[in-house]
């Protein structure tokens, strides 16, 4: 799980009120043809909110931030296209220089002109050691970023970093505002100004984020004039409020989304994702730090049953961070459900069953806690299923629910039902997930996984411009995870959304783990148009 994704989830609380001042919201079925917030408004329910709205601290780093734009952005097929740059970058033959020509006439929402100095300011500030951006290692390849006049920015890299262009979807902050504040605590973190299609009108933490269309947006003023993201942590509550008309759309677990299948006024959207659920196996625990226990748990879990029963088929078994249908997946690293094989591994390693069926070795009982976030039905179901499968092998897993504030201090020794995934490039998720030097760095490498072969392969893949060499390096990573799983990967989860069917434009991309602000059928809400009656 990436630091940004989990930190965003960490501050989420159950919304007690979504939209105030709109009488229709309290009446069942009130959405009608006009929607929850009005004819030109959209209100959607999301499960998490960010800790900050500053791209300097990590907000929107994978694109679709609504308030901001990057130099590039993604189209519906996840292909890069120009945004604040007028074209894709010119790349030098050695792969170490990227030059971006900037779009002319772009202004920030306060009317100030956008220029190359804002791009330079954004990247240099993120890379500054004083900036509390947990994802800055993602920009490790940058040696320098320079402005050439008002309309050209040139990045020079330390080494050829194949996916660098993907990193330039990162939102650009205005130097004239953010540069005059404390980067970590200034007003810009909650009152941002950008070049994007929407302007933030208010943020009630734990409740909602409100946006209005930016009339000066370079891409044209959106037809959706008001856009509200209601923060509703609990899945059941989100479904109830969607059904009552308080929401125009929401992300829902597959079993709850099924309840809307016969609703002619709404559509169900399913998005393929790289989003996985896994169990961290902390190195600093007497049980989960034992390689034999890790290997046994990896075989004991019934991933196919989890997909069928927990996800209603909306997903796939996961054997690592890379989905099985990705060209980066290493064939042959699938793990079969093999309870007998798991028991044999434990027997051979000296973990013997006690009177209660739970194994013991050298006086240590094969037992450990597994935390999941309160209100997250999918994580809860996965945690309970994992514990049930582990019990059959003689391992006692005690499930516990809590907020991220409760869970984070325990992550060094306690297992967590976690998640992550990024479709843009295998480096983006695996480096933060597995690099040993990042163990204990916030939510990076939560298990404190330490494998020298994996460290070397991650570095080799990140520094190579040769696709074949990169594939070979990631093959090494995936094979090492079979030998010594620092995590038990369970499922890759398709994201399921239910949206009022009154707009032309909603659709899905291949999505990362993060879902809510940047993903969902509203990833392109600025392009939606009212349906013609």
Image: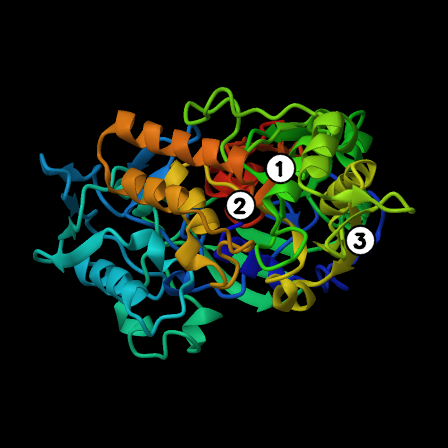
Can you tell which of label 2 and label 3 is closer to the viewer? Answer: 3
Left or right? Give the position of 379 relative to 321.
Answer: right
- Answer with the quarter of the image where residue 176 lies: bottom left
Mark 2 neighbour density, 10 Å: few (under 14) some (14–19) many (20 or more): many
> What residue is pinned by disc 2?
224
What mark, if any, has residue 232 been given in the picture?
Answer: none
- Answer with the quarter of the image where residue 307 lies: top right
As measured in the structure, the alpha-carbon distance from the residue carrying label 1 to the one carrying label 3 is 19 Å
Helix, strand or loop at label 3? It is strand
Left or right? Give the position of 221 relative to 408.
Answer: left
Q: Is residue 384 visible?
A: no
As measured in the structure, the alpha-carbon distance from the residue carrying label 1 to the one carrying label 2 is 51 Å
The mark total stands at: 3
Identify the mark nearer the N-term, 1 or 3: 1
> What residue is pinned by disc 1?
295
Q: Position of residue 478 (x, y in %)?
A: 46, 33
Q: Position of residue 253 (x, y in %)?
A: 73, 38
Q: Quadrant of the C terminus?
A: top right
Mark 1–mark 2 CB contact (< 8 Å): no
**How was this image coloured?**
rainbow
Identify the mark nearer the N-term, 1 or 2: 2
As measured in the structure, the alpha-carbon distance from the residue carrying label 2 to the one carrying label 3 is 47 Å
Helix, strand or loop at label 2? It is loop
In this view, the residue in front, 56 or 344, is 344
Mark 2–mark 3 CB contact (< 8 Å): no
Which residue is drawn at the image coordinates 28% and 40% (left, top)?
A: 460
Which residue is drawn at the image coordinates 12% and 58% (left, top)?
A: 147
> What residue is pinned by disc 3?
398
């Amino acid at each position: 799980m990436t630091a940004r994704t989990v930190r965003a989830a960490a501050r989420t609380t159950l919304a007690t009120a979504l939209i105030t001042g709109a009488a229709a919201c309290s009446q069942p079925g009130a959405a009608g043809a006009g929607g929850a917030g009005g004819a030109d408004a959209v209100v959607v329910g999301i499960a998490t909110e960010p800790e900050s709205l500053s791209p300097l601290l990590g907000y929107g780093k994978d694109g679709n931030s609504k308030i901001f734009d990057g130099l590039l952005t993604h189209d519906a097929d996840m292909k890069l296209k120009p945004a604040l740059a007028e074209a894709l970058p010119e790349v030098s033959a050695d792969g170490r220089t990227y030059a971006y020509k900037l779009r002319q006439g772009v202004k920030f929402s306060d009317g100030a002109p956008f220029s190359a100095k804002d791009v330079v300011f954004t990247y240099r500030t993120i890379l500054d050691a004083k900036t509390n951006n947990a994802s800055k290692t993602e920009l490790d390849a940058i040696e320098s970023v320079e402005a050439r006049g008002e309309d050209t920015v040139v990045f020079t890299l330390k080494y050829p970093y194949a996916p660098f262009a993907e990193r330039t979807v990162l939102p650009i902050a205005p130097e004239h505002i953010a540069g005059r504040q404390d980067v970590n605590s200034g007003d810009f973190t909650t009152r941002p100004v950008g070049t994007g299609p929407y302007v933030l009108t208010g943020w009630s933490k734990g409740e909602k984020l409100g946006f209005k269309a930016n009339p000066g947006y370079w891409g044209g003023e959106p037809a959706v004039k008001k856009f509200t993201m209601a923060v509703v942590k609990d899945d059941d509550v989100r479904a109830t409020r969607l059904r009552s008309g308080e929401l125009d759309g929401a992300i829902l677990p597959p079993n709850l989304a099924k309840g809307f299948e016969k609703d002619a006024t709404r559509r169900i959207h399913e998005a393929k994702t790289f989003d996985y659920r896994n169990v961290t196996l902390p190195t600093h625990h007497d049980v989960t730090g034992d390689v034999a226990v890790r290997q046994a748990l990896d075989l004991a879990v019934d991933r196919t049953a989890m997909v069928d029963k927990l996800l209603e088929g909306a997903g796939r078994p996961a054997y690592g961070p890379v989905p099985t249908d990705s060209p980066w997946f290493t064939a042959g690293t699938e793990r079969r459900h093999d309870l007998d094989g798991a028991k044999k591994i434990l027997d051979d390693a000296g973990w013997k069953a006690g009177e209660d069926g739970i194994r013991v070795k050298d006086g240590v009982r094969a037992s450990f806690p597994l935390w999941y976030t309160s209100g997250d039905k999918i994580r809860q179901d996965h945690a309970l299923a994992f514990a049930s499968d582990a019990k059959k092998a003689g391992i006692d897993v005690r499930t516990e629910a809590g907020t991220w504030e409760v869970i984070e201090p325990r992550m060094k020794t306690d297992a967590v039902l976690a998640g992550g995934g990024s479709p843009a490039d295998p480096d983006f998720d695996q480096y933060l997930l597995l690099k040993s030097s990042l163990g204990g760095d916030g939510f990076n490498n939560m298990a404190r996984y330490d494998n020298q072969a994996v460290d070397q392969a991650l570095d080799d893949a990140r520094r190579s411009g040769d696709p074949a060499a990169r594939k070979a390096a990631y093959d090494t990573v995936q094979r090492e995870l079979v030998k010594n799983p620092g995590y038990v990967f369970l499922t890759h989860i398709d994201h399921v959304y239910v949206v009022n069917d009154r707009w032309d434009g909603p659709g899905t991309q291949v999505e990362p783990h993060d879902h809510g602000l940047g993903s969902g059928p509203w990833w392109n809400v600025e392009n939606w148009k009212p349906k013609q009656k």
